[in-house]
C-alpha cells in the first residue's frame, strides 16, 4: 500500500545504536561518580582541618573567666551581687586566697566589718598578704581609726613598695592621724608613680594645703584638672585636719609649723630656710607647669 505525504523512514535495528548509548551513559555515570568522590574528599579534608584547628585552639578557662566577672562586678560597685557569685564560684571550684580576698573586699564595702576583718586576717600569711593588710587599713579608716589604718597600710606598702594606691592611702591616713611630716614621702612617691591619677594629685594638694602652701595646692589642683567637687573635698578635709590636735610638721626649734584651729600657722617662717615645704615635690610641680 502506498502512503501519501512524508515517506516513512525505514526501521532501525535496536542493536545498531544501543552500544553507543550504553557507552555514553556509562561515561556520564563515571563522571558523576568522579565528581562526587572529589566533593566527598574535599569535605572530609575540610572537616579534618576544622577538627585540627579546634584541637589547637586554647580551651576557655572557666575559672579565670568567672574570676574576671567577679572583679568586674566589684569595679562597678556591685558588691552584694559579687558575694553571691563568690559563693557560687567556691561551690564549683573551691576556695583560693584570691577569691577570699575578693570576699573580704565585698564584705568591707557592704559594711560587714567583723566578717571582713576576720577574712582579711586569715590571708596575712598568704599570697594576698599585702592586699589583706591594705584591706585592714581601709577597714580601720572606715571607722575613723586613722592611726590603726596607718599601721596596717604601712605593712601593705612594705610588701608592695611601688604600689601607688597603697602609698597614697598610707599618706592620707597619716595626714588624717596628724602625722603630716611622715605623710610627705609616701604621698610624693604615689604622685610620681601615678602622675595622671587625680586621687594622687588630690592627696598631694591636700598635703601642700595643710603644710601652709595654699597657693601651691591651688596650682596643683588647677594643673591636675581636678573637678570643683574634688577641690571642695580637698579643702573640706584640710579644714577637718586643721581642727584636730595641733600636729607637728617639722621638729625645728627655730620655727615649727603647726596646724591649729583650722588654719596653718608658722612661728618663724622666714628664719627657717631648711623648711621649704614643697621642696620634695618640685618635680611634680614642674610637671604641672606651676612656673615657680
Image (cartoon, rainbow, N blue to C red):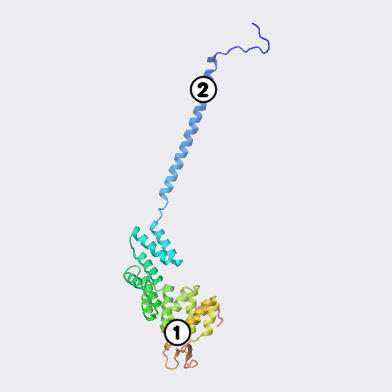
Residue toward you, 266 or 120: 120
Mark 2 neighbour density, 10 Å: few (under 14) some (14–19) many (20 or more): few
Distance between the alpha carbons at the discs numbered 1 and 2 = 106 Å
Read off the residue under disc 2.
Answer: 23
- Relative vertical location of residue 271 with respect to residue 107 in this rendering, above or below: below
Q: Position of residue 142 (x, y in %)?
A: 40, 76
- Relative vertical location of residue 124 with respect to residue 290 in this rendering, above or below: above
**Quick check: marks 1 and 2 in contact, CB under 8 Å?**
no
Q: Residue at x 37, y 60 (%)?
A: 88
Please state, as top left, top right, bottom left or bottom right, where the N terminus lies in the image: top right
Q: Position of residue 35 (x, y in %)?
A: 50, 33
Residue toward you, 189 or 167: 167
Tell me the quarter of the picture where residue 3 sits: top right
Q: Residue at x 40, y 48 (%)?
A: 55
Mark 1 neighbour density, 10 Å: few (under 14) some (14–19) many (20 or more): many
Q: Residue furthest top?
A: 1
Q: Is residue 278 visible?
A: no
Check disc 2 and report its element: helix, strand or loop.
helix
Q: Position of residue 160 (x, y in %)?
A: 39, 72
Horizontally, residue 34 falls left or right of residue 125, namely right
Horizontally, residue 151 falls left or right of residue 30, namely left
Q: Residue at x 49, y 84 (%)?
A: 209
Read off the residue under disc 1.
Answer: 241
Check disc 1 and report its element: helix, strand or loop.
helix
Q: Is residue 192 visible?
A: yes
Q: Residue furthest right?
A: 5
Q: Residue at x 49, y 80 (%)?
A: 234
Please state, as top left, top right, bottom left or bottom right, where the C terminus lies in the image: bottom right
Q: Which of pointers 1 and 2 indicates the residue nearer the eye?
A: 1
- Relative vertical location of residue 245 with respect to residue 283 in this rendering, above or below: below
Amino acid at each position: 500500500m502506498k502512503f501519501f505525504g512524508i515517506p516513512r523512514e525505514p526501521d532501525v535495528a535496536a542493536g545498531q545504536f544501543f552500544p553507543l548509548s550504553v557507552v555514553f551513559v556509562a561515561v556520564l555515570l563515571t563522571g558523576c561518580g568522579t565528581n562526587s568522590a572529589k566533593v566527598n574528599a574535599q569535605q572530609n579534608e575540610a572537616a579534618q582541618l576544622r577538627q585540627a584547628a579546634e584541637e589547637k585552639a586554647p580551651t576557655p578557662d572557666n575559672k579565670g573567666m568567672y574570676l574576671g566577672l567577679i572583679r568586674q562586678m566589684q569595679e562597678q560597685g556591685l558588691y552584694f551581687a559579687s558575694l553571691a557569685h563568690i559563693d557560687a564560684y567556691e561551690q564549683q571550684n573551691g576556695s583560693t586566697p584570691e577569691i577570699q580576698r575578693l570576699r573580704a573586699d565585698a564584705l568591707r564595702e557592704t559594711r560587714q566589718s567583723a566578717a571582713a576583718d576576720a577574712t582579711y586576717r586569715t590571708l596575712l600569711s598568704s599570697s594576698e598578704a599585702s592586699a589583706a593588710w591594705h584591706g585592714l587599713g581601709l577597714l580601720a579608716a572606715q571607722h575613723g581609726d586613722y592611726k590603726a589604718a596607718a599601721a596596717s597600710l604601712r605593712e601593705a606598702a612594705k610588701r608592695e613598695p611601688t604600689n601607688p594606691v597603697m602609698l597614697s592611702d598610707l599618706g592620707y591616713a597619716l595626714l588624717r592621724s596628724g602625722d603630716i611630716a611622715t605623710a610627705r614621702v609616701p604621698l610624693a612617691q604615689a604622685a610620681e608613680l601615678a602622675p595622671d591619677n587625680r586621687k594622687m594629685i588630690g592627696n598631694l594638694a591636700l598635703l601642700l594645703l595643710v603644710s601652709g602652701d595654699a597657693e601651691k595646692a591651688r596650682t596643683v589642683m588647677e594643673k591636675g584638672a581636678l573637678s570643683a567637687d574634688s577641690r571642695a573635698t580637698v579643702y573640706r578635709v584640710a579644714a577637718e585636719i586643721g581642727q584636730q590636735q595641733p600636729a607637728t610638721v617639722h621638729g625645728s626649734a627655730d620655727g615649727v609649723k603647726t596646724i591649729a584651729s583650722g588654719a596653718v600657722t608658722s612661728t618663724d617662717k622666714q628664719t627657717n630656710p631648711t623648711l621649704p615645704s614643697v621642696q620634695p615635690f618640685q618635680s611634680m610641680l614642674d610637671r604641672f607647669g606651676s612656673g615657680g
